[in-house]
Image (cartoon, rainbow, N blue to C red):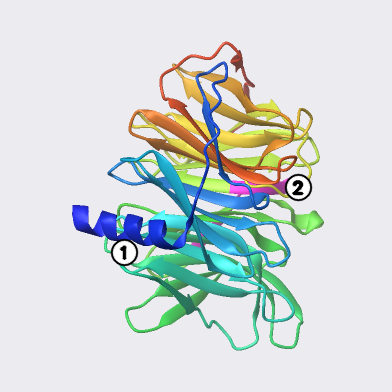
Amino acid sequence: MKVTFKSQKVLANTLVAVCAIVVLRGVLTGAEWKIETVDSTGSGMYSSLKIDRSGNAHLAYVTEIDSHPLKYAFWDSSVKRWFTMKVGGPASFCTLVLDSKQYPRISYADFGTGLGCKLRYAYWDGGAWKIDPIVIQVGAVVAYYTSIALDSNDKPFFSYYDYADPSNNFRLRMRSVFWMGSYWAANTVDPQSGSGKFNSIAVDSKGNPHIAYANVKYETSGLRYASWDGLAWNTEIIEGATKPTVVYSVALVLDKDNNPHIVYSDVEQSLLKYATRSRGAWQIQTIDSQGAGYPDRNGIALDSEGNPYLSYYDQKQGALKIAFRKNGKWMREVVEQGFAGFTSSVVVGGDTLWVSYAHSAEQSLKVAHRPLNVAASSQVEAGLSVAQGKH
């Protein structure tokens, strides 16, 4: 459905009326990055960024203050300004997508209900925010990690980490929820204990969901992948089948041919890795040694030619980095230093590369953007393939 000028202005005007106008701080770096402070009320964690067809930016995040509110920021491309507002909360680990009207939809874990969290679904209906509780099982606990995707008909799919049952017995499994038109249907994706943390969901061109996620029980730890065939989930182990591999910070995107592209952190080796599958075979590449260790959120996006862009926090340097592949070579660049870059999200919007991230030292949420095809003096060639083949 085509986005109307009126629908865009309703959202923009509502935000202007109820939100604080953010003062921008623009800085140019070596790669022509322009860096803007979106929210200075607290460190903006778990940011999830999308650019709509009109060039406006939509951003969900959680401010690290006592109430942990779920917040939403909107960048109006016509006036070049950010507007922010509170949506709900207390919240954790939100993800955002845009529907066919270019309205934002958000999944998050609401931990204001005692032990653990409940899965929540927030969406803009054209005039106001609506929040729906997704009741999977009365008393069930969802532990922080959630993700949302839509099919071409705006049907929502959620992935989540099922933490405990109503009696607080730990389950620790990968689960999904589909909207069936009149009710929510929950499915167990991977029942093995420890499966489901750091999950990321995407929907292919046939309307089938795919999930990349970690198993975090040490004996079975590794990177896993699940795909829905219309009747059941099919799971596979990408890394960790032969020996435990501690994996955090998984993010997934599908290309136009429905091939998966995954970025994740190999914690014990302090490596950023990238996995993709083509013609049935997985290929894994080491991109950087970034001192991984703390649960983070890496970002991944593809340009129109299918080239991947990865955003991540280099713990050794305390810096936000971008890695990307051009002409068969991996390149890296530093966007900002000084303990900036935690829980990032990257997206390609037209001819512009965007990344959102938390700045821990400044207790803020920032967004950086630059022209897509600008070469940076700080770029260096990154790692080579360390493993490949069908796993």
Q: Secondary structure at mark 2?
A: loop
Query: Does 238 appear in magenta?
Result: yes
Which residue has dot 2 on it?
246
Question: Toward the viewer: 260 or 19?
Answer: 19
Between marks 2 and 1 in the image, the one whose residue lies nearer the viewer: 1
Which residue is at 41% across, 35% downward? 348
Which residue is at 76% across, 47% downward? 246
Query: Does 198 appear in magenta?
Result: no
Question: Toward the viewer: 122 or 176?
Answer: 122
Label 2 vs 1, first from the N-terminus: 1
Residue 368 place in picture, x, y as percent: 52, 33
Which residue is at 75% across, 45% downward? 245
Which residue has dot 1 on it?
154
Query: Is residue 324 left or right of 351 when viewed as pictured?
Result: right
Quadrant for the C terminus, please. top right
| Label 1 Cα neighbours within 10 Å, binned few <14 / some 14-19 / many ≥20 | few
Residue 260 place in picture, x, y as percent: 46, 44
Most extreme residue toward the top, as rendered?
377
Q: Which residues are magenta?
A: 234-250
Question: Toward the viewer: 23 or 286?
Answer: 23
Can residue 248 be seen in this snapshot? Answer: yes
* 261, above or below 95, in the image: above
* 274, above or below 18, in the image: above
* 65, above or below 172, in the image: above
Q: Amino acid at mark 1?
A: Asp
Q: Amino acid at mark 2?
A: Val
Q: Which image quadrant is residue 62 in?
A: bottom right
